[in-house]
Amino acid sequence: MQNLDLPLDNVTKGVAAVFENSARGFYLVAELHSDEGKTDGTSPETSNGLALAGCLLITTEWSDWWNAEYWWIQSTFVLPQFRGQRIFTSLYEHLTGLARTLNTTPGAEDGETRLRVSEIRLYVEKQNDARFVYDRLGFQDSGYLMMSLSLRD
């Protein structure tokens, strides 16, 4: 868990940017009826009156090696009152189901069935307490070292 103190205005604009331009990615959102799970009235409600439990932001990266996409779980968040209720696992299972369906569906551009999503990838902090969940779901160390050059001043 990063526990970053991010400017709300930045985050709000960043989330809105995904909805304004689908090339930036897509969200999967977990919602619960108020009588499901440990809702305590503090969870934000979605437009249909359900309690927001968690979400994943998925971004894509093209792989010329595989002629397919990598889907990155760019960010994951489960509200504290819903942790331990398999919210992340449910979102993950939905995501892998989408990818597997896409890989077995003929493409609109060519009518061919081919690999469209090669891998689902995830950044994980070395000290992340939730790593055991990712291990249990089959994620493995990819062998790559993640490096970055910050351009934030």
Image (cartoon, rainbow, N blue to C red):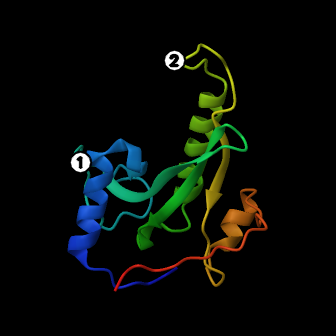
| Residue indicated by mark 2 | 108
Secondary structure at numbered mark 2 = loop
Spatial separation of the CA atoms under disc 2 and disc 1: 35 Å
Label pair 2/1, CB-CB below 8 angstroms: no
Image position, residue 140 (x, y; %): 77, 63
- Specify the quadrant of the image occupied by residue 102: top right
Upstream in sequence: badge 2 or badge 1: 1
Residue at point 46%, 80% (across, down): 150
The residue nearer to you, when weighing 149 against 130, is 149
Left or right: 97 with respect to 55?
Answer: right
Image position, residue 82 (x, y; %): 45, 65
Number of the front mark, 2 or 1? 2
Q: Which residue type does callout 1 highlight?
A: Gly
Question: Tag 2: Cα neighbours inside 10 Å, few (<14), some, or many (≥20)?
Answer: few
Q: Relative to residue 79, is residue 22 depicted above or below?
A: above
- Specify the quadrant of the image occupied by residue 133: bottom right
Left or right: 122 with respect to 48?
Answer: right
| Residue indicated by mark 1 | 49
Secondary structure at numbered mark 1 = loop
Image position, residue 49 (x, y; %): 23, 48
Image position, residue 131 (x, y; %): 67, 72
The residue nearer to you, when weighing 37 against 60, is 60
